[in-house]
Amino acid sequence: MEFLVAPGGSIHGEARVPGDKSISHRSVMLGALATGETSVTGFLQGEDALATVAAFRALGVEIDGPRKGALRIRGVGLEGLRAAPSSLDMGNSGTSMRLLAGILAGQSFASELVGDTSLMGRPMQRVITPLTRMGAVIEAGDGGRPPLRIAGGSKLHGIHYDLPMASAQVKSCVLLAGLFADGETSVTEPAPTRDHTERMLRGFGYDLESQDGSVKLHGGGELRGCEIDVPADISSAAFLLVAASIAPGSELLLTHVGVNPTRTGVISILRLMGADITVSNEREVGGEPVADILVRSAVLKGIDIPRDLVPLAIDEFPVLFIAAACAEGRTVLRGAEELRVKESDRIASMAEGLTTLGIRNEVLDDGIIIDGGTLSGGTIRTFHDHRIAMSFAVAALRAEAQIRILDCDHVATSFPGFDSLTRGLGLQIASRDAGE
Ligand code: S3P
């Protein structure tokens, strides 16, 4: 599937984007490990979260749905998972693979985790190292890449782990393994990262201590099934925040968006660039802050992105690069080497597309320099990365000619219905099968 996006237009109306991907994954994982039933609303029916559902079904958990974002999970308790009949295919989803590795390391049976071409190339040593220190036995492919073969049957023991990188996936993996470990498991992170695992563990009644960048729990407790209302994903909202900011004459209200402070770097960065964003109706839904966000178009300016905001906006950089391309002056991003190991190397993928559209940029080891300018049209490669595809779709609002975006199938991993939703708001986007 590819997108053809005609140049120009503006963005108007009101929208609720699909549910948060990180929270959707965790709702299934903790719901499965809980005693009693967990019911979820607002669940993301995207391929990544569905891969997590399929994995837990294969591990013997009864799950109804999702239907219209509603899911019911009959928890089996910490000791209740069963060996899957074959390898667990995590598709494109790094979150599923890394968090599940933590859970499966604590089981009495063996498991194998595989994924699509993108996931099979992503680094897993970052979870193998701490899990091995906890007593797990894990074999991986070359360079610590999948497949992951987790032997099972080893009793894990709690450790303290100083995370070498700011990664919520590694933090969550260790904490989830800690549920099955003897004694205390704790992690310290070098910078704050998304804390959905910690919040949700508390929501399931699990005791957890967190202070000064460290989180601590004791193994062997109990998770109790609960109700979860998943907010709209700020990472999906980000495409529309940038779209309405760069397209003159736009005004858009995004409702029920998750605004957990570990996720709102995109709002802070856009505001520093001069964006007109108003957050209102702030409330807490199931332990997660939620709000409505009004965005109007504005003249953006280039900035030096503060390093402390990098982990808080880690998934939003592709579309922030489009904002930078439409801004006056130069934007500099440093300290973002993690972008190189996402669904694609997002620094390289974005740099190629920006160059195709005539935007001057310089690639750095850990970031990029982008000079704002005029975007031409052109044909963009996505490297099978959903966020690259959606970012360049948004760019068409300020392009001089059509943008054709190849290989857009992966958009369904995180934002099913992206084309129809954005079309309804004013983006002149058409999708077609690549063969047409
Ligand atoms: C995620 C954490 C982030 C993020 C990913 C989802 C999570 O990855 O990029 O999309 O749900 O924990 P890292 O922890 O590798 O930075």
Image: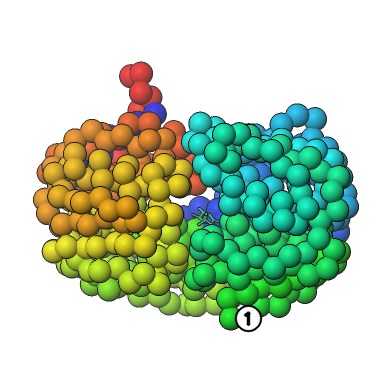
How many circles with numbers are drawn on the protein? Answer: 1
Amino acid bearing label 1: Gln
Which residue is pictured at 71% across the width and 78% down the height? Answer: 209
Residue at coordinates 38% horizontally, 59% vertically from top-left? 336
In the rendered view, would you say 382 is above or below 264? Answer: above
Q: Which residue position holds label 1?
A: 211
Q: Is residue 131 left or right of residue 406?
A: right
User: In this orientation, which residue lies closer to the viewer: 104 or 90?
Assistant: 104
Quarter assignment of residue 280: bottom left
Quadrant of the rendered image containing residue 112: top right
Residue at image point 11% right, 50% down: 374
Q: Position of residue 141 (x, y in %)?
A: 61, 34
Nearest to the observer: residue 393 or residue 182: 182
Query: Does the image show residue 341?
Result: yes
How many residues crowd mark 1 within 10 Å: few (<14), some (14–19), many (20+)? few
Residue 84, x across and y down, in percent: 79, 35
* Quarter of the picture holding the C terminus: top left
Q: Residue furthest bottom?
A: 212
Q: Does residue 252 appear left or right of residue 286 in this picture?
A: left
Q: Horizontal placement of 163 versus 347: left or right? A: right
In depth, the one of 169 and 124 nearer the eye is 124
225 or 222, which is in the foreground? 222
Q: Quadrant of the N terminus?
A: top left
Q: Is residue 66 visible?
A: no
Picture coordinates of residue 263, whole percent (x, y): 48, 66
